[in-house]
Amino acid sequence: MKIVHTANFAILLFSSLFINVNSKQTVLVSNLQNKTGRLFIAWYSTAESFPGQDPDFSKEIDVKNLTEISIPFDEIPDGKYGISIFLDENNNGKIDLNFLGIPKEKYGFSNNVFPLTRAANFEEAAFEIQGKSTVIPIRLK
């Protein structure tokens, strides 16, 4: 009897290593500066798609006169992700750039990375989700 219980425990432990756990994650966006517009938040799990093609998860949230906002994401599987965000202040569905290609609207990336002359890449923005709920702070620039 003792051997059966030990074997069942070992099988349960081993199989749990291959189960993809989903958890609730909250993105805390700050430095909105009381702006009004539509916040676009996108999660990516590959360098090839980051930061703008075929997100794994995304949300669009209307904001008005806020300095920060918490956005919940339910059922996020464990894995490596990068998040990109922009605030579409003029509601045209895209981030507006100046003639040099620099964003004119507020934007941000997970890990709060802001390279000087380009957008953050996946490796700079990437973080791990590992079975527990967390708050991911992102400060807009």
Image (cartoon, grey):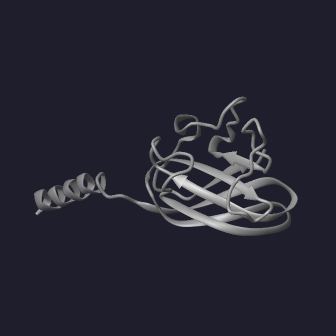
* Residue drawn at x 14%, y 59% as measured from the top left: 2
Say which residue appears at 15% left-offset and 56% top-offset. 7
Side (left or right) of 7 relative to 91 = left
17 sits left or right of 76 in the view: left
- The residue that appears at 80% across and 62% down in the rendered structure is 90
Q: Is residue 139 visible?
A: no
Quarter of the image where the N terminus is located: bottom left
Of all residues shown, which one is farthest toward the top?
A: 116
Depth check: 75 or 84 in front? 84
Does residue 58 appear in this view?
yes
- State the count of labels: 0
Q: Position of residue 81 (x, y in %)?
A: 50, 48
- 71 lies above or below 99: below
- Kindly identify the residue that appears in the image at 86 percent across and 60 percent down: 35
Q: Nearer the viewer, residue 100 or 43?
A: 100
Q: Is residue 42 above or below residue 97?
A: below
Q: Quadrant of the C terminus?
A: top right
Judged left or right of residue 86, residue 21 is left
Furthest-front residue in this view: 99
Q: Residue 135 in the image: x percent, y percent?
A: 64, 55
Q: Would you say 67 lies left or right of 56 here?
A: right
Q: Where, by quadrant of the figure, is residue 48 drawn?
A: top left
Q: Position of residue 30 (x, y in %)?
A: 78, 53
